[in-house]
Image (cartoon, grey):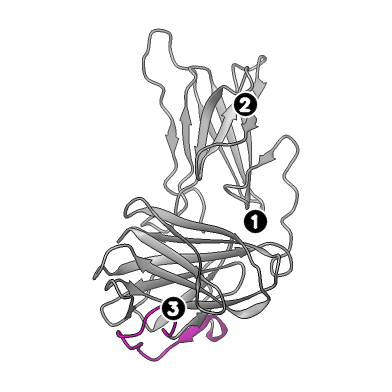
Protein backbone atom coordinates (compact mmCIF):
# COMPACT_ATOMS: atom_id res chain seq x y z
CA UNK A 1 0.00 0.00 0.00
CA UNK A 2 1.23 3.54 -0.67
CA UNK A 3 2.79 5.20 2.34
CA UNK A 4 3.00 8.76 3.58
CA UNK A 5 5.77 10.88 2.06
CA UNK A 6 9.04 10.28 3.77
CA UNK A 7 8.82 6.49 3.61
CA UNK A 8 8.51 4.57 0.36
CA UNK A 9 7.91 0.85 -0.07
CA UNK A 10 9.79 -0.84 -2.89
CA UNK A 11 8.13 -3.73 -4.73
CA UNK A 12 10.15 -6.24 -6.74
CA UNK A 13 8.39 -6.75 -10.07
CA UNK A 14 6.62 -10.06 -10.39
CA UNK A 15 6.90 -10.92 -6.68
CA UNK A 16 5.06 -10.07 -3.49
CA UNK A 17 5.70 -6.86 -1.57
CA UNK A 18 9.09 -6.97 0.14
CA UNK A 19 9.31 -5.22 3.49
CA UNK A 20 12.94 -5.42 4.52
CA UNK A 21 15.27 -2.69 5.78
CA UNK A 22 17.32 -3.02 2.60
CA UNK A 23 14.27 -2.13 0.50
CA UNK A 24 13.01 0.79 2.54
CA UNK A 25 14.44 4.28 2.22
CA UNK A 26 13.67 7.29 4.41
CA UNK A 27 14.35 10.94 3.64
CA UNK A 28 14.05 14.01 5.76
CA UNK A 29 10.94 15.95 4.91
CA UNK A 30 11.76 17.90 1.70
CA UNK A 31 11.71 21.66 1.46
CA UNK A 32 8.48 22.60 -0.41
CA UNK A 33 10.36 25.45 -2.06
CA UNK A 34 12.69 23.08 -3.92
CA UNK A 35 12.03 22.12 -7.54
CA UNK A 36 13.08 19.25 -9.80
CA UNK A 37 16.79 20.08 -9.82
CA UNK A 38 17.39 20.31 -6.07
CA UNK A 39 14.64 18.16 -4.53
CA UNK A 40 16.24 15.33 -2.43
CA UNK A 41 16.19 12.12 -4.46
CA UNK A 42 15.60 8.53 -3.40
CA UNK A 43 17.27 5.72 -5.35
CA UNK A 44 15.30 3.49 -7.72
CA UNK A 45 16.80 0.40 -9.36
CA UNK A 46 16.02 -1.25 -12.66
CA UNK A 47 13.19 -3.73 -12.21
CA UNK A 48 11.62 -1.97 -9.21
CA UNK A 49 8.26 -0.33 -8.56
CA UNK A 50 7.94 2.31 -5.88
CA UNK A 51 4.65 3.01 -4.11
CA UNK A 52 4.71 6.65 -2.99
CA UNK A 53 2.44 9.62 -2.39
CA UNK A 54 2.50 13.34 -3.14
CA UNK A 55 1.66 15.48 -0.12
CA UNK A 56 1.46 19.18 0.69
CA UNK A 57 4.93 18.92 2.29
CA UNK A 58 6.63 17.73 -0.93
CA UNK A 59 8.77 19.76 -3.29
CA UNK A 60 7.00 21.69 -6.01
CA UNK A 61 7.84 23.16 -9.42
CA UNK A 62 7.38 26.73 -10.58
CA UNK A 63 3.75 25.96 -11.47
CA UNK A 64 2.93 24.80 -7.93
CA UNK A 65 2.78 21.11 -8.84
CA UNK A 66 3.89 18.75 -6.04
CA UNK A 67 6.64 16.32 -6.97
CA UNK A 68 9.10 13.66 -5.78
CA UNK A 69 12.54 12.83 -7.19
CA UNK A 70 14.25 9.47 -7.82
CA UNK A 71 17.82 8.89 -9.03
CA UNK A 72 19.11 5.85 -10.93
CA UNK A 73 22.29 4.67 -12.62
CA UNK A 74 22.45 4.06 -16.34
CA UNK A 75 24.95 3.51 -19.13
CA UNK A 76 25.00 5.15 -22.53
CA UNK A 77 22.93 3.22 -25.08
CA UNK A 78 20.75 1.50 -22.51
CA UNK A 79 17.01 1.58 -23.14
CA UNK A 80 14.65 2.33 -20.28
CA UNK A 81 10.88 2.31 -19.81
CA UNK A 82 9.55 4.40 -16.92
CA UNK A 83 5.87 4.50 -16.01
CA UNK A 84 3.86 6.50 -13.50
CA UNK A 85 0.36 5.40 -12.49
CA UNK A 86 -2.08 7.16 -10.15
CA UNK A 87 -5.79 6.85 -9.56
CA UNK A 88 -5.71 10.04 -7.45
CA UNK A 89 -4.42 12.51 -10.04
CA UNK A 90 -3.49 12.90 -13.70
CA UNK A 91 0.09 11.57 -13.72
CA UNK A 92 2.96 13.60 -15.17
CA UNK A 93 6.42 12.03 -15.43
CA UNK A 94 9.71 13.71 -16.32
CA UNK A 95 13.16 12.28 -17.05
CA UNK A 96 16.12 14.57 -16.35
CA UNK A 97 19.62 14.36 -17.78
CA UNK A 98 22.39 14.11 -15.14
CA UNK A 99 22.91 17.85 -15.74
CA UNK A 100 19.34 18.51 -14.59
CA UNK A 101 18.04 19.45 -18.03
CA UNK A 102 14.82 17.91 -19.36
CA UNK A 103 15.35 14.70 -21.34
CA UNK A 104 11.76 13.48 -21.83
CA UNK A 105 8.30 13.81 -20.32
CA UNK A 106 4.92 12.13 -20.55
CA UNK A 107 1.49 12.52 -18.99
CA UNK A 108 -1.61 10.41 -18.56
CA UNK A 109 -4.99 11.36 -19.92
CA UNK A 110 -6.75 11.48 -16.56
CA UNK A 111 -6.66 9.97 -13.04
CA UNK A 112 -6.42 6.20 -13.40
CA UNK A 113 -4.14 6.38 -16.46
CA UNK A 114 -0.41 5.82 -16.92
CA UNK A 115 2.33 8.20 -18.08
CA UNK A 116 5.08 6.30 -19.92
CA UNK A 117 8.57 7.30 -21.07
CA UNK A 118 10.61 5.17 -23.50
CA UNK A 119 14.14 6.50 -23.76
CA UNK A 120 17.66 5.48 -24.79
CA UNK A 121 20.22 6.87 -22.35
CA UNK A 122 22.90 9.07 -23.91
CA UNK A 123 25.33 9.22 -20.98
CA UNK A 124 26.80 6.92 -18.35
CA UNK A 125 25.91 8.37 -14.95
CA UNK A 126 24.48 7.56 -11.53
CA UNK A 127 22.49 10.80 -11.51
CA UNK A 128 19.72 10.25 -14.03
CA UNK A 129 16.47 11.37 -12.39
CA UNK A 130 12.77 10.55 -12.64
CA UNK A 131 10.30 13.19 -11.41
CA UNK A 132 6.76 11.96 -10.67
CA UNK A 133 4.26 14.78 -10.23
CA UNK A 134 0.61 15.68 -10.66
CA UNK A 135 -0.32 17.47 -13.86
CA UNK A 136 -2.24 20.14 -11.92
CA UNK A 137 -0.97 22.46 -9.16
CA UNK A 138 -1.75 21.65 -5.53
CA UNK A 139 -2.99 18.11 -6.25
CA UNK A 140 -1.83 15.26 -3.97
CA UNK A 141 -2.34 11.49 -3.73
CA UNK A 142 -0.81 8.05 -4.08
CA UNK A 143 1.13 6.79 -7.12
CA UNK A 144 3.23 3.90 -8.41
CA UNK A 145 6.50 4.55 -10.26
CA UNK A 146 8.16 1.72 -12.21
CA UNK A 147 11.55 1.56 -13.94
CA UNK A 148 12.54 -1.16 -16.43
CA UNK A 149 15.92 -1.30 -18.19
CA UNK A 150 17.31 -3.31 -21.08
CA UNK A 151 20.38 -5.46 -20.52
CA UNK A 152 22.68 -5.52 -17.53
CA UNK A 153 20.33 -4.67 -14.68
CA UNK A 154 17.61 -7.24 -15.28
CA UNK A 155 18.11 -10.89 -16.28
CA UNK A 156 16.60 -11.50 -19.73
CA UNK A 157 13.08 -12.92 -19.55
CA UNK A 158 12.61 -16.53 -20.59
CA UNK A 159 11.31 -17.09 -24.10
CA UNK A 160 7.53 -17.26 -24.52
CA UNK A 161 5.87 -20.68 -24.69
CA UNK A 162 5.26 -22.25 -28.09
CA UNK A 163 2.49 -20.55 -30.02
CA UNK A 164 2.70 -17.35 -27.96
CA UNK A 165 3.86 -13.95 -29.18
CA UNK A 166 5.26 -10.92 -27.35
CA UNK A 167 4.51 -7.24 -27.75
CA UNK A 168 6.65 -4.27 -26.66
CA UNK A 169 3.62 -2.69 -24.95
CA UNK A 170 3.90 -5.39 -22.23
CA UNK A 171 7.47 -6.74 -22.15
CA UNK A 172 6.87 -9.16 -19.24
CA UNK A 173 3.92 -10.91 -20.92
CA UNK A 174 3.30 -13.16 -23.90
CA UNK A 175 -0.01 -13.84 -25.58
CA UNK A 176 -1.83 -16.53 -27.53
CA UNK A 177 -5.17 -15.83 -29.21
CA UNK A 178 -7.35 -18.44 -30.91
CA UNK A 179 -10.38 -17.37 -32.91
CA UNK A 180 -13.18 -19.60 -34.18
CA UNK A 181 -14.99 -22.81 -33.20
CA UNK A 182 -13.17 -25.91 -32.07
CA UNK A 183 -11.94 -27.79 -35.12
CA UNK A 184 -11.68 -24.59 -37.19
CA UNK A 185 -9.49 -22.41 -34.96
CA UNK A 186 -7.47 -19.58 -36.48
CA UNK A 187 -4.30 -18.54 -34.65
CA UNK A 188 -4.35 -14.83 -33.91
CA UNK A 189 -1.51 -12.70 -35.25
CA UNK A 190 -0.03 -9.62 -33.59
CA UNK A 191 -0.53 -6.52 -35.71
CA UNK A 192 2.22 -3.87 -35.44
CA UNK A 193 1.52 -0.17 -35.10
CA UNK A 194 -1.31 -0.58 -32.60
CA UNK A 195 -2.43 2.25 -30.35
CA UNK A 196 -0.60 2.95 -27.09
CA UNK A 197 -0.61 0.21 -24.39
CA UNK A 198 -2.75 -2.02 -26.61
CA UNK A 199 -2.03 -5.33 -28.33
CA UNK A 200 -3.89 -5.67 -31.65
CA UNK A 201 -4.62 -9.16 -32.95
CA UNK A 202 -5.94 -10.14 -36.37
CA UNK A 203 -7.59 -13.39 -37.36
CA UNK A 204 -8.61 -14.67 -40.78
CA UNK A 205 -7.44 -11.54 -42.64
CA UNK A 206 -4.02 -10.04 -41.89
CA UNK A 207 -4.36 -6.37 -41.01
CA UNK A 208 -8.00 -6.65 -39.90
CA UNK A 209 -7.96 -6.40 -36.11
CA UNK A 210 -10.44 -8.68 -34.37
CA UNK A 211 -9.20 -8.53 -30.76
CA UNK A 212 -7.73 -5.79 -28.53
CA UNK A 213 -5.72 -6.82 -25.44
CA UNK A 214 -4.76 -4.49 -22.61
CA UNK A 215 -3.30 -4.97 -19.10
CA UNK A 216 -3.81 -1.62 -17.32
CA UNK A 217 -2.72 -0.97 -13.78
CA UNK A 218 -1.93 -1.38 -11.07
CA UNK A 219 -5.54 -0.40 -10.39
CA UNK A 220 -6.86 0.78 -6.98
CA UNK A 221 -7.09 -2.79 -5.68
CA UNK A 222 -3.39 -3.33 -6.44
CA UNK A 223 -3.86 -5.67 -9.42
CA UNK A 224 -3.21 -5.47 -13.15
CA UNK A 225 -6.51 -5.92 -15.00
CA UNK A 226 -6.33 -7.98 -18.22
CA UNK A 227 -8.92 -6.59 -20.60
CA UNK A 228 -10.21 -8.18 -23.81
CA UNK A 229 -12.21 -6.27 -26.43
CA UNK A 230 -13.36 -8.17 -29.46
CA UNK A 231 -14.82 -7.23 -32.84
CA UNK A 232 -15.83 -10.70 -33.98
CA UNK A 233 -18.86 -12.84 -33.06
CA UNK A 234 -16.71 -15.97 -33.23
CA UNK A 235 -15.46 -17.82 -30.16
CA UNK A 236 -12.23 -16.27 -28.78
CA UNK A 237 -9.75 -17.90 -26.40
CA UNK A 238 -6.98 -15.75 -24.97
CA UNK A 239 -4.00 -17.06 -22.99
CA UNK A 240 -1.82 -14.50 -21.17
CA UNK A 241 1.51 -15.76 -19.81
CA UNK A 242 3.70 -13.84 -17.31
CA UNK A 243 7.29 -14.41 -18.41
CA UNK A 244 8.98 -13.53 -15.12
CA UNK A 245 6.82 -15.80 -12.95
CA UNK A 246 5.29 -18.39 -15.29
CA UNK A 247 1.81 -17.39 -14.13
CA UNK A 248 -0.84 -17.87 -16.80
CA UNK A 249 -4.48 -16.86 -17.28
CA UNK A 250 -6.90 -18.25 -19.87
CA UNK A 251 -10.08 -16.42 -20.90
CA UNK A 252 -12.80 -18.01 -23.04
CA UNK A 253 -15.31 -15.75 -24.79
CA UNK A 254 -18.10 -17.85 -26.27
CA UNK A 255 -19.53 -17.37 -29.74
CA UNK A 256 -22.17 -14.67 -30.00
CA UNK A 257 -25.64 -16.04 -30.88
CA UNK A 258 -26.92 -15.20 -34.38
CA UNK A 259 -28.93 -11.99 -34.43
CA UNK A 260 -27.29 -10.54 -31.32
CA UNK A 261 -25.77 -7.08 -31.61
CA UNK A 262 -23.64 -7.44 -28.46
CA UNK A 263 -19.98 -8.43 -28.55
CA UNK A 264 -19.17 -9.03 -24.87
CA UNK A 265 -15.50 -8.80 -23.86
CA UNK A 266 -13.79 -9.61 -20.58
CA UNK A 267 -12.29 -7.65 -17.67
CA UNK A 268 -10.38 -9.51 -14.94
CA UNK A 269 -9.99 -7.29 -11.88
CA UNK A 270 -7.63 -9.72 -10.11
CA UNK A 271 -5.53 -10.86 -13.06
CA UNK A 272 -1.91 -10.28 -12.02
CA UNK A 273 -0.05 -8.55 -9.21
CA UNK A 274 2.49 -5.93 -10.37
Decide if residue 30 is in sight here: yes
Q: Which residues are magenta?
A: 21-39
Residue that appears at 27% across and 73% down: 64
- The vertical placement of 12 against 168, above or below, is below
Q: Position of residue 42 (x, y in %)?
A: 49, 82
Q: Are marks 2 and 3 in contact (CB under 8 Å)?
A: no
Find out whether residue 268 is within the magenta segment: no
Find out whether residue 36 is within the magenta segment: yes
- The vertical placement of 222 against 167, above or below, is below
| Front of the two marks 1 and 3 | 3
Residue pointed to by mark 1: 245
Q: Position of residue 255 (x, y in %)?
A: 49, 18
| Front of the two marks 2 and 3 | 3
Left or right side of 105 for 238: right
Q: Position of residue 205 (x, y in %)?
A: 62, 17
Left or right side of 227 for 33: left
Q: Position of residue 179 (x, y in %)?
A: 59, 22
Residue that appears at 42% across and 47% down: 269
Q: Which sits in the foreground, 248 or 137?
A: 137
CA separation, marks 2 and 1? 23 Å
Residue pointed to by mark 2: 178
Q: Quadrant of the N terminus?
A: bottom left
CA separation, marks 2 and 3? 42 Å
- The vertical placement of 30 against 225, above or below, is below
Q: Quadrant of residue 219?
A: bottom left
Tag 1's secondary structure? loop
Q: Residue furthest bottom?
A: 28
Q: Are marks 1 and 3 in contact (CB under 8 Å)?
A: no
Amino acid sequence: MPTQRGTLSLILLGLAVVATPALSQTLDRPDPRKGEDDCPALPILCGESVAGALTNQDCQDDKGRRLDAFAFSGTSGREIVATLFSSAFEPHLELLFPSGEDAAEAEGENPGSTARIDFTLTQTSSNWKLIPKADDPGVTGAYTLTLLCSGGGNPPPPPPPDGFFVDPAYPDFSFRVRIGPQGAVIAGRREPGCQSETVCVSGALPGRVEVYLRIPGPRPNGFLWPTIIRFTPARVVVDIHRLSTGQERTYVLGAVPPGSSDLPGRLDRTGFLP
